[in-house]
Amino acid sequence: MTHHAFTLAGETLHALPSGALYWPAQALLCVSDLHFGKSERRVRRGGMALPPYEAQETLTRMQADLEGTRATTVVCLGDSFDDLRAGDGLPDDARLWIARLQAGRRWIWAEGNHDPGPVDLGGTHLSEVRLPPLFFRHIADPAASGEISGHYHPKTSLRTRAGTLSRPAFLIDTRRVILPAYGTYTGGLRSTDRVLDRLMEPDAIAVLTGQRALPVPMRH
């Protein structure tokens, strides 16, 4: 088994090695922080260009996850685009690829703090997604329960015989899940950061992404 199965609000969820979350009962795949257009935005603002094909690499992983899970609903959990102009700057081949992935599926773009307004990419645009008993929003509400969020791009490190392994990671406790960034070339916040420490319960776990989903104590 390469994924990590767990329960939240009585529902079984799968943390996939790619950084996507799968809800089998709803045939729903959730990804967060795609940050399409990150390279173009950096160049536009006078920064260094990132390696090419960031959108293609992200979409390749998403296509594999959709084919592997056969999900019929997709929730993109905010910050799908890197800034207000990134949607317009998305290459034509990436836009066509997204359209192919959307075909025959319910596709929801949840609002994030980087996202533009409605873009011409199909799907539904919502501030948050309520599918009781679970709630999907971009930024965690400390008072919430049964919540799935993103925004912080959590990462965690693990010492191994070969050295220190640092990967994007899910953060999971009995009340919430915080997803890692799914997009290519996104930064991250250490799971030991005070902001995340305050949000997560004492026995929270981190699930590292990679070839397989690897659960470890968040505060190891």
Image (cartoon, rainbow, N blue to C red):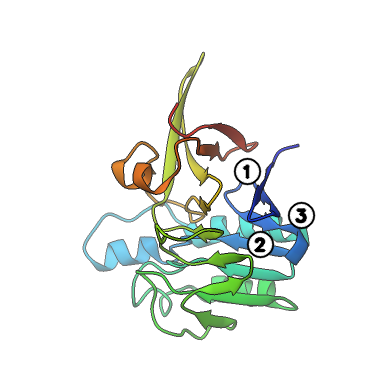
Residue 149 seen in render: yes
| Residue that appears at 38% across and 78% down | 116
Q: Secondary structure at mark 3?
A: helix
Distance of label 1 from label 3 (alpha carbons): 12 Å
The label shown at residue 201 is: none
Look at label 2 and name its amino acid: Leu
Total marks shown come to: 3
Residue 93 seen in render: no
Q: Position of residue 111 (x, y in %)?
A: 44, 74
Cβ atoms at labels 2 and 3 below 8 Å apart = no
Pick the residue in front: 24 or 155: 24
Q: Secondary structure at mark 2?
A: strand
Q: Earlier in the sequence, mark 2 or mark 3?
A: 2
Residue at image mark 1: 17
Q: Earlier in the sequence, mark 1 or mark 3?
A: 1
Give above or below for 28 relative to 167.
below
